Amino acid sequence: MSTRISPGAPRALPISREGRDTLWLLTVLALCIAPHAMRLPLWCAAGTGVALAWRAQLAWRDAALPPRWVLLLSLLASVALTLLTYRSLMGREAGVTLVTLLAGLKTLELRARRDAFVITSLGFFLILTQFLHSQTPGMALLMSAAFLGLLSALVLAQRPLGRPSIASALKDAGRAVAWGLPLMLALYLLFPRIGPLWALPSDAGARTGLSDQLTLGRVAELALDDGIVMRLRFEGATPPPQALYFRGPVLDDFDGQRWTARPPHPDTDRMDALRADTLRGPWIDHEVTLEPSGLRQQALLEGTVEVRAEQADVQGWQRVGLAWTAPSPPRERLRLQARALSAWHSGPAAPDPILRNWTQLPAGFNPRTLAWALDFSRQPTLRGADARTLANAVMQHIRQHDYRYTLAPGDDALGANGQPERHLIDRFWLDRRSGFCEHFATAFVVVMRAMDVPARVVTGFQGAERNPVDGMLVVRNSDAHAWAEYWQAGEGWVRADPTAAVAPERIDRTRPLNRRADSASGGLAHLAPDWLLRSRAALDAANHRWNTWVLAYSRQNQLDLLSQWGWPAASGMDLLRLCLIVVVSLALAGVLWLWATRPRQRTSPWQGLLNRVHGDLLATGVPAPA
């Protein structure tokens, strides 16, 4: 990148050395930017693409670069558009947008090696920012290729003479990477994990779709989201499919349109307490890997009473009854060892005045359903019946009266006249009779409360997919589910799932991975060839191993490694000391190797060539000067 050919001069090769090296650098820079393209504002992606294409065209023609006033105006426009879009130049999104634009504009003044060094530095920074959004193995491989390409561009910039091939530059870059691998592994294994460096920012990472409130139609939307919520591996036998309920937020209050969770309070919290006589087992021990979520309350296998983890922030988790709450929404993937009860009783066995809170209904909503429930409870066979008998009778009514389970029940927000629907339960229970799990659960609770039985809605996940490659169970957002609980004297809270009454296949099944019978993609999944399904299962298993072996490598793993090496009671300072010892040792080894392989010529290369010519002349009988 140090010599130029005038635009009018003839050339033997189709492109000059400088043009070829520039095109290679532009290609690698485009690879660094490409994964960001869908996240960048349209004007940023388009502007950067135009800048790179313009510079490539100039490099191919060996044409003159644009004047500086063009670059200055482009820079001012970029800063102004970034401010208008994000209201700031600070922060992750604004910063990545601005760096991407600066990298594109910098290529338009690429003249010397110094400019190439600046562009490659921006490329390295863009590689790092990719991992704020995705840390998958595929992204790691793609960014490794981009990293190798940037190193090869640096090698070419350091060789201004001749026309070294790109392949030779890639070879030298690969050799440099190989030399750096021992140091990289030492830092990965031993450098102390400092929270902010390894934690994702608060707005990064996946989010589960559960919420602490529910409006009809919300859970059905999650059925179209295949995002992973958790993975599980059980010690011993896997529970049957109908036992795979993962308990999330419990919704207590209904205002006629929306169900919400009641704030924590000692008087109501004791209504969820597990009875001591149920804490003796039998136990279900399992390992669960939770993806980051936007809720403090975590959806765990129902009956979970104990969790252990390597991450320190899990120590602040609290259990109230069957509900687990974290101090703050987890921002990182968590790997837990959990223990759950296979059978339990929660809530008081004897009547309590506080239970009246779960019989309340808003005035002026769903009058037809309330009247229906009152008439239903007055049947001769149900007069004076307990809660279990009433619940079983409602389930039987659902089975016998043409209720239908569907993911597309229609618009719940608007009535037939186009106005907002006020009586949502009336419309479902008495008119349409088709809905998703949330419709059945909420209507069941309203009917039970109308019959003066304490009841509430529980949200979470139900069911899982089994990966045949590693045997893990995968729970997705599309497994989101809503069911009900009612209070039975002598027992406490009892689970009731009205969805099982109308669509038992939704509950009593364990799907193989990618064969979804209850989602919009289920039909296409059944048409996919077996080799494609196996490939997807293998890819999912590889992603899980990457997450647990690489991304989840924590400080506790480091301390465990030191213990295996015979370093008992290791601490963070011990890690730092050992890391410094390894780094210094590797550096000294490198210096010794350079010293051992140094050139040992006592004469200069030019003097050596003269001596060879002198000897050849004498050998042929030609007189030579001394």
Image: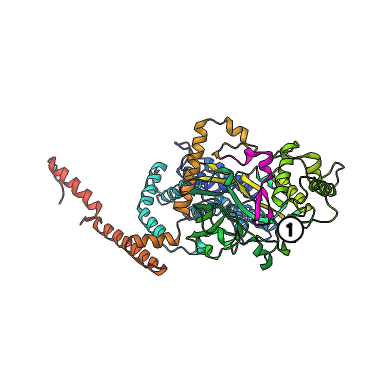
Q: Is residue 273 left or right of residue 339?
A: right
467 drawn magenta: no
Q: From this viewpoint, which residue is outermost toward the right?
A: 417
Q: Which residues are magenta?
A: 482-509
Does residue 334 appear in this view?
A: no
Helix or strand or loop: what does disc 1 sit on? Answer: helix
Which percent across, then down, holds residue 185?
38, 55
Residue under the image location 73 percent in, 37 percent down: 400
Which percent across, then down, holds residue 539?
49, 41
Residue under the image location 38 percent in, 47 percent down: 174
Which percent across, then down, holds residue 541?
48, 44
Q: Looking at this view, is 177 or 240 the one in front?
A: 240
Above or below — where is 465 with respect to 270? above
Q: Is residue 311 left or right of residue 591?
A: right
Q: Looking at this view, is 245 or 515 the one in front?
A: 245
**On the image, numbered disc 1 is attached to which residue?**
358
Residue type, label 1? Trp
